[in-house]
Image (cartoon, rainbow, N blue to C red):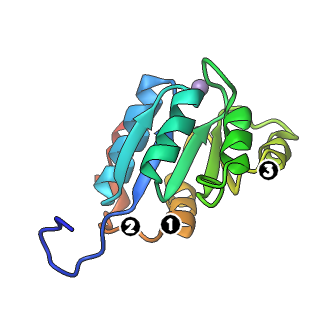
């Protein structure tokens, strides 16, 4: 382990799957500010491939993607013994009735809606990937500027 502090736990790795650059930037900034390590994928098939290769601790999965849908990406992840144990949290803009159930039916372990509500979002990430290595007061948060 290359950690600067011997004995410190390795940072948790989160694969962010999001095709909107602004949303990607926001999620990345928020997670990194809390000490999580992030990887980024803008397409579903690439995300599935990256998950197989890098085995992240958590996958945040946008449902509307340019190639395969997030639901299909999730089904592929959960079918593959190499990736099925990685928790997947769906992140979706459509807050319509039935979306959460569709996400869960496809194998998603959790569900959050956009726009991101920071406390809920961080609690969900924490529950699946482990607590943040860095805690910030919310007013110093990168997302505060976007509100
Ligand atoms: Mn999208």
Residue 2, x across and y down, in percent: 16, 64
Image height check: is 81 above or below 77? below
x 45%, y 45%: residue: 53
Give 73 or 92, whichever is nearer the viewer.
73
User: Gap between marks 2 and 1, in whole Å?
Assistant: 7 Å
The residue beneath circle 2 is: 132
The residue beneath circle 1 is: 126
Residue 126, x across and y down, in percent: 50, 66
Graded by Cα atoms within 10 Å as few (under 14), some (14 to 19) or many (20 or more), the crowding at tag 3 reads some
> Quick one: SS at disc 3?
helix
Give 124 or 105, whichever is nearer the viewer.
105
The residue beneath circle 3 is: 104
Give 134 or 56, whichever is nearer the viewer.
56
Graded by Cα atoms within 10 Å as few (under 14), some (14 to 19) or many (20 or more), the crowding at tag 1 reads few
Compare marks 2 and 1 and give the one earlier in the sequence.
1
Q: Is residue 55 left or right of residue 76?
A: left
Compare marks 1 and 3 and give the one earlier in the sequence.
3
Q: Nearer the viewer, mark 1 or mark 3?
A: 3
Image height check: is 35 above or below 69? below
Q: Is residue 1 left or right of residue 89?
A: left
Image height check: is 49 above or below 81? above
User: Gap between marks 3 and 2, in whole Å?
Assistant: 25 Å
Residue 84, x across and y down, in percent: 66, 55
């Amino acid at each position: 382990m290359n950690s600067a502090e011997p004995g410190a736990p390795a940072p948790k790795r989160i694969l962010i799957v999001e095709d909107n650059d602004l949303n990607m930037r926001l999620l990345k900034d928020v997670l990194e500010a809390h000490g999580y390590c992030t990887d980024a994928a803008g397409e579903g098939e690439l995300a599935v491939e990256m998950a197989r290769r890098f085995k992240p601790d958590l996958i945040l999965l946008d449902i509307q993607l340019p190639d395969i849908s997030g639901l299909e990406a999730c089904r592929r992840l959960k079918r593959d013994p190499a990736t099925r144990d990685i928790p997947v949290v769906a992140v979706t803009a459509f807050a319509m009735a039935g979306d959460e159930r569709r996400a869960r039916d496809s194998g998603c372990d959790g569900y959050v809606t956009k726009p991101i509500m920071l406390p809920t979002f961080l609690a969900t990430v924490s529950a699946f990937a482990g607590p943040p290595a860095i805690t910030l007061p919310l007013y110093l948060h990168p997302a505060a500027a976007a509100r």
